[in-house]
Amino acid sequence: MEIFGIDIGGSGIKGALVDTETGELASERVRILTPQPSKPEAIVETAVEIVESHGWEGPVGCGFPAVMKEGVIQTAANIDKSNVGFDLRRAMEARLEGPVHTVNDGDAAGMAEMKWGAGKGMSGVVFMVTLGTGLGTSLFVDGKLVPNTELGHIEIRGKDAEERATDRARKKKSMSWPKYGKRLDEYLRRIEALLWPDLIILGGGISKKSEKFLDTLSTRAEVAIAKMHNEAGIAGAALAGIEAKETADTR
């Protein structure tokens, strides 16, 4: 079954058709820069443009960088504050005239890794962090998602963890790879003290360069590199879109 997946981020919005049996993209991936300022109406317009560029008229799953409750945006860390309280699902459905399901973007990436990637078949506690503009996180217990964890915002040395351990922070502060690795390790060790995961999955574009910092990590848990890479958010959003299809089928 094919579902359209959209991954909305602080810097870019990307989407494609996804084969939800294999996790592979079934169409060309389209990416457009996130509008600045990232007002909700502008974000919706860009997301709709991506869907319509494929001529798609079916169910859509949409990952968004915020806590999501029944389609409504609850937080705004790396997007304009005006998004808080905006009903993204209803706005997308009105524009696309079809079913849409929304999900936290970190959860979407984790869902993809648990179904097709580094977490496939894993039981116990699995923690995934997507290293990018922010720290997107997802938590699974025996394969079941604990939604909207937002653990990228825990405090470390008096600062939001996102200010210290993201790829954006690394670039902004021109950190060497060993220095970045130590900061990431400090973050992961703090997570371990709270959750005691059995597996930690590192995702995001920077995970492709893991050989530059992996040997600086000292976690008790096994660390695995995400296999879905930049397609995780889109593929996971498409998984969420299955719920939109099921909802539409019962209407």
Image (cartoon, rainbow, N blue to C red):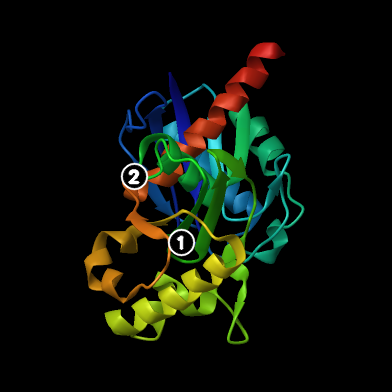
Amino acid beneath label 1: Ser
Q: Determine the image quadrant of residue 248.
A: top right
Does 185 sit above or below residue 210? below
> Where in the figure is residue 229, as x and y percent of width and height?
33, 50
Left or right position of 231 against 74: left
For the N terminus, which image quadrant?
top left
Left or right position of 56 against 248: left
Q: Which residue is mark 2?
A: 228
Left or right position of 72 against 36: right
Crowd tier of the residue under label 1, counting other residues whose Cα lies within 10 Å: few below 14, some 14–19, many 20 or above: some
Amino acid beneath label 2: Met
Q: Which residue is mark 1?
A: 11
Secondary structure type for disc 1: loop
Mark with earlier residue (1, 2): 1
In front of the other: 235 or 115 = 115
> Where in the figure is residue 113, as x and y percent of width and height?
41, 43
Real-space CA distance between mark 1 and mark 2, rounded to the nearest whole angstrom: 19 Å
Q: Determine the residue located farthest toward the right in the rendered image.
A: 85
Left or right position of 55 against 88: left
Say if residue 171 shows up in the picture: no
